[in-house]
Amino acid sequence: MAYWRRSSRQMQAATGQVAVAPSSPAAEKPKSPRSRMMRQYDLVERVRSYNPDTNEDLLNRAYVYAMKAHGTQTRASGDPYFSHPLEVAAILTNLKLDDATIVAALLHDTIEDTEATRAEIDNIFGHEIGALVEGLTKLKRLELVSREAKQAENLRKLLLAIADDVRVLLIKLADRLHNMRTLEFVPHASRRRIAEETLDIYAPLAGRMGMHEMREELEDLSFHVLDPEAYAVVKQRLDALADRNRNLISEIESQLSKNLQKNGIPARVYGRRKQPFSIWTKMERKSVGFEQLSDIYGFRIILSDAEACYRALGVVHTTWPVVPGRFKDYISTPKQNDYRSLHTTVIGPGNQRVELQIRTEEMNQIAEFGIAAHAFYKEGMGSPTERLEHESNAFAWLRHTVGILSESANPEEFLEHTKLELFHDQVFCFTPKGKLIALPRQANVIDFAYAVHTDVGNSAVGCKINGKFSPLSSELQNGDEVEVLTSQAQSAPPSAWESLAITGKARAAIRRATRTAVRDQYAGLGRRIIDRLFARAKIEYADDKLKGALPRLARASIEDVMASVGRGELKASDVARAMYPDYKEERLVKYGAKKSLAVKLKLKSEPHPARSTSVIPVRGINSDLPVKFAPNGGAVPGDRIVGIVTPGEGITIYPIQSPALKDFEEEPERWLDVRWDIDETMPQRFPARILVHNVNEPGSLAQVATVIAEHDGNIDNISMSRRSPDFTELTIDLEVYDLKHLSAIIAQLRAKAVVAKVERVNG
């Protein structure tokens, strides 16, 4: 999130307000609220209000145990420390959670901050509560170097704990909410870090779990800390608008209720003002001022059942004009966090835009409390995890996200994936068979393919959207039917797809497939290098024999050895010595110190492909080997070529006449015998560079370009420099099929009157 990038002065200009300058740090020093702590009786009554069968004895014992355990400990505010777990428990009673969750909230800091132990809690309160408390305790026992790594690891630990019991998340969110409510007592240096983490992770995670009220409060508390001036200005404008429109709001509520009642639809209608953070982010996203916002108030219509919701929608749409494009049906197609509602916007009384949410009482409970609305206190319904697997799409998303943990290469990669998933709204698309796929906004077909299955994404080569061929990068819209076209010939996706993908799942899968493909390329290269050395030395190679030598090479598998050789991290001669301790490198014995002579003698012979097993074939850039061509010149079929191994980069192909090869004369172990292996049925282009001295007159560059185009060459890059008033020097990077093709283009250029000289450049 980057809402604070907009300065407070910009905010003032947008709203027409002047913010009051912040007071000095001394003046900001807060006073402790020291509010009366909730008593045992109050806590029991709060739980009994929604769960008449609550275990009062368990709650009382937990209250007393936690109070005694924390003893004289105090918080930064000066309040007794016990007030914190008590407030966390109170927040969870508002969510109507079960006894075990309330008790775990009371005890959640005891193992970490007091003399209490897990064994003692298990003995007194049972294994279920002990596991919840320990799950929360583990989250705090992390000491990592960077803030980013700590944030990533905290999230990993949190989600892994949730995988066993989602109530750990609910307690953690309540814990964070109370800490944010009392953040003013935390040292100033820590406030911003805590607020940023809350806005980055905990608020959107609450949203993903459908807990919108908690999400909104966490966002506003963070916003207040991160940009207090902007917060104050937005709140001031909202309060002023509320005073001005108080009659209008009651009028809209009244008219909606009367119209619905007249049509036989009893409903509960109430208006609700949007929160400062929501207003601010909308202004940022749309680059508009406060006065340009037309949907600061939303109205909720609560009905008895889903059928009544659609009838109410009909009444609303026949009473007031509808704003086009603002209708969404989340009842027939719920969001992944279980949110269900009808959304529409109409032009209501006083020509005021009115945003309506139409839903049932049950839908409203889930919209406000999310995953916490699934009645954890009910008996005889299995464990919370088992119930949620059947009842909650939000929990399914959570389990899926936890599954990504095992596929992430590092904590930061996982954090990136989770943030991408948390911060996006959704778009709903369909497979040709009618399966619904939910994706973030701005997702494209690549994301869709990986959402269907990783193998579909890896082998995708094209697509049809609503029956029409479209690029894989096409952004998807609600209701699109997407057919992904695949090919078995593509085993790994292009690495460039990672920058096109929106979802963390797609990016992670592309990274994983790319890493595997690159490793396979290096392993293939390494095997060819080893085969070549063994053939030249006339010694036998066998995987079984290499397996026995793995400890001497400090590698875990044969593939690791091959990849290390291909990357240049391990010499083929070292592999031979590990397998055959008596092996001596013939080349060094035969030529002694004359290493460069060995190279030159090797290069003078160009073995026939059919007669040589020690020469590595080159099929081009898109081959199964990590191959690239020499910079500043390239190489084309027809050139005599040599390969140079660069550690970590693979093979670079140079034409034999390249002056750059002199730089490698003292490193014979990096030289490879290579040959062209071109499929004439599938021609491909290769890089070459030419230098053209052109007469400096109008149209001369066009003539050069025309010659190249007419002869089916492709200009990849061109640069110009003035060597004299009469001539311009053009350096042109071409793509051609082979040496014959390049020579034909050069000959035709030389025939042009505007061309004084043409020569090929070898870097």
Image (spheres, rainbow, N blue to C red):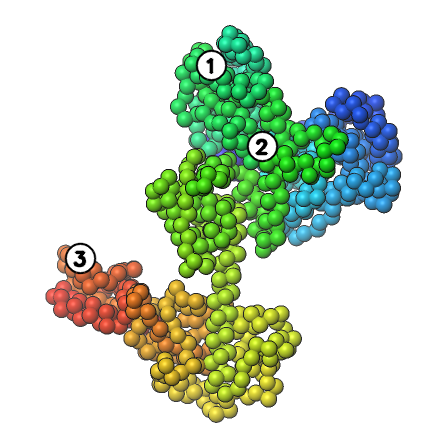
Horizontal side, residue 558 vs residue 355: left or right: right
**Which residue corresponds to mark 3?**
702
The residue at the point 64 percent across, 36 percent down is 390
**Which residue corresponds to mark 2?**
338
Q: Secondary structure at mark 3?
A: helix
Q: Report the Cα–Cα distance between label 1 and label 2.
A: 26 Å
Image spot of residue 349 (x, y percent):
45, 11
Foreground disc of the pair 1, 3: 1
Between 758 and 430, the one nearer to me in the picture: 430
Between 226 and 154, the one nearer to me in the picture: 154
Q: Residues within 10 Å of mark 3 (few under 14, many from 20)?
A: few
Among numbered discs 3 and 2, the one appearing first in the sequence:
2
Determine contact: label 1, label 3, CB under 8 Å: no
- Residue type at mark 2 is Asp
Between 557 and 594, the one nearer to me in the picture: 557
In the displayed structure, 540 sits above or below 24; it is below
Residue that sits furthest to the left in the current view: 753
Among numbered discs 1 and 2, the one appearing first in the sequence:
1
Q: Secondary structure at mark 2?
A: loop
Image spot of residue 628 (x, y percent):
40, 67
The residue at the point 37 percent across, 70 percent down is 619
- Residue type at mark 1 is Val
Q: Report the Cα–Cα distance between label 3 and label 2.
A: 62 Å
In this view of the protein, can residue 118 be seen by the observer? yes
The C terminus sits in image quarter: bottom left
**Which residue corresponds to mark 1?**
315
Horizontal side, residue 513 vs residue 87: left or right: left
